[in-house]
Amino acid sequence: MPKENDLSVAKREKTVKSICENNLIYQDILETSTDGFIFVNKNGYIIYINKAYYEFLGFKTKEEVIGKYILDVIKNYELIDILLTGRTDVDVYQYVEGQNVKKSVVAVTRTVVTDGDQVIAAVGQVKFSKETKLLAEKFQDIDNKSKYFRGELKRRETGYTFESMIGSSPKFLEAKAVAKKAAENDFSVLITGETGVGKEVFATAIHNASDRSTKPFIQINCAAIPNELLESELFGYEEGSFTGAKKGGKPGKFEMANGGTLFLDEVGELPLSMQVKLLRVLQEKEVERIGGLQPKPIDVRILAATNQNLDVSMRNHTFRPDLYYRLNVIPVKIPPLRERSEDIQFFINVFMDELYQHFGIKKHIASSAWRLLQQYDWPGNIRELKNVIQRAYAISDSDKILDEHLPANIVGKVHTNKFLSDYKSLDNILNEIEKEILLNCLRENDYNCRMTAKELGIHRSTLYKKFKKFNMDIIRNN
């Protein structure tokens, strides 16, 4: 930060203050102006600010601001740049962010103050008139939408298509064929499947293959939004409709998706009160913002997804049948990974190749680890598989991924499942465990039956009966 230790600086400050107060700005007028005014000296320290501006920045008095470096009060460098370049800005729309105020778009005019040929200060005017503020807020909405759609475009360029989908199992190919048919029309689609099977992938592919592919694809996770905010997120709100409502209001996801596709993820989590409102929007094809007086017509294609069994939800009266039938025009059921085990190898190869492309280190999976990955039932589906492969790749110190690099729950569960499949019943499992304990104890006691029975806490006659029960041909050594 610049240092204020020069006598010439103090002299110029006095000159600037005199100019500001007596000649240039007519202080009484500025103090009653609804626009904001701020002056900085040639080193960027604030020497004047009017009431409209310091209150906008969240301060109670000008004394809290005067004497501070401009960048400590307003988080932009423009006035500093004005001092360095001598340029003038007129009605420039930009973000202003102060230490006590959130980021806002305002219209700003800036110029330098000179004494002869010397730049001695810079002045900024922020326009707070109603018309200017409304225009700035509209600009901010457009900018926010532009950023959102730029992100959507980037996602779409690297997004999912039916051609990029991995899998050759019959159940997967059947779901893919139905989804392709759904892309040819505008009917609502309900995508069902367990967590991690790729419901969002299917929804994106349907949109990208449809006639709406060049229009917005808007997503909302119904389970991730608090119930009290869902209505404003979906339908938007008007200015002043509730405490904290943004000036100028805010469009909801339906308005943002107009002409395109709205993807309602985890739709089974919607509270009943919201289900009624959603059904009305789907039936009437129009949406009304919170606090609004006039409904707006919309043209939106609905894709919905859930990992819940909505038949059970309807029986439990937690999901409306009329909404279910409105959404479930074309059902797409994605099979879990355990029902398409032939596709596991495809996914692993793709994930390993992605890691190689990113990190430049080629690694291979040992045959025993391959067997464990193939035999595991993958309750977290594709998402869990990708997580496991990334983890194993990261912790392997060599070019090979071994059993020890896989999570313990996978190794243990596969071995347990194999044990259960080998011995079928609980009695057989318990007998096998008991037999193994007897043999281990006998070996440790050099096959001395007396010592073995004592260590096991049973009588020798009981030990002999167990030998007979398990067909154990043991040479009895006392």
Image (tube, grey):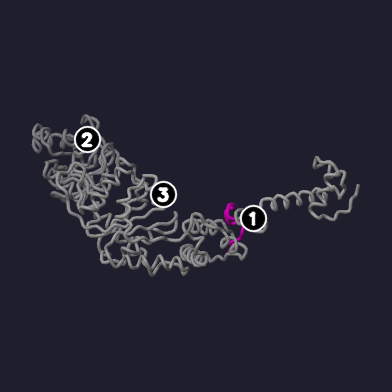
Residue beneath label 2, please? 10
Q: Secondary structure at mark 1?
A: helix
**Residue that sits furthest to the front in the current view:** 315
Give the number of the mark in front: 2 or 1: 1
Locate residue 119: give its quadrant: top left
Which badge, 2 or 1, is on the more N-terminal residue? 2
Judge whether residue 332 can be spotted in this image. Answer: yes
Report whether 464 appears left or right of 392: right
Sequence-wise, the earlier of marks 2 and 3 is: 2
Q: Amino acid at mark 1?
A: Leu
The answer to whether residue 11 is visible is no
The amino acid sitting under disc 2 is Ala
- What residue span does the magenta drawing correspond to? 398-410
Q: Which residue is mark 1?
A: 420
Q: Determine the image quadrant of residue 29.
A: top left
Which numbered dot is residue 131?
Answer: none
Which is closer to the viewer, label 2 or label 3? 3
- State the separation of the CA atoms marked 3 and 1: 31 Å
Please state which of residues 322 and 111 is positioned toward the viewer in this rendering.
322
Q: Is residue 407 magenta?
A: yes
- Rendering coords of residue 354 (x, y %): 46, 64
Residue picked out by circle 3: 312
Which residue occupies 57% across, 58% down? 396
Is residue 316 part of the magenta span, yes or no? no
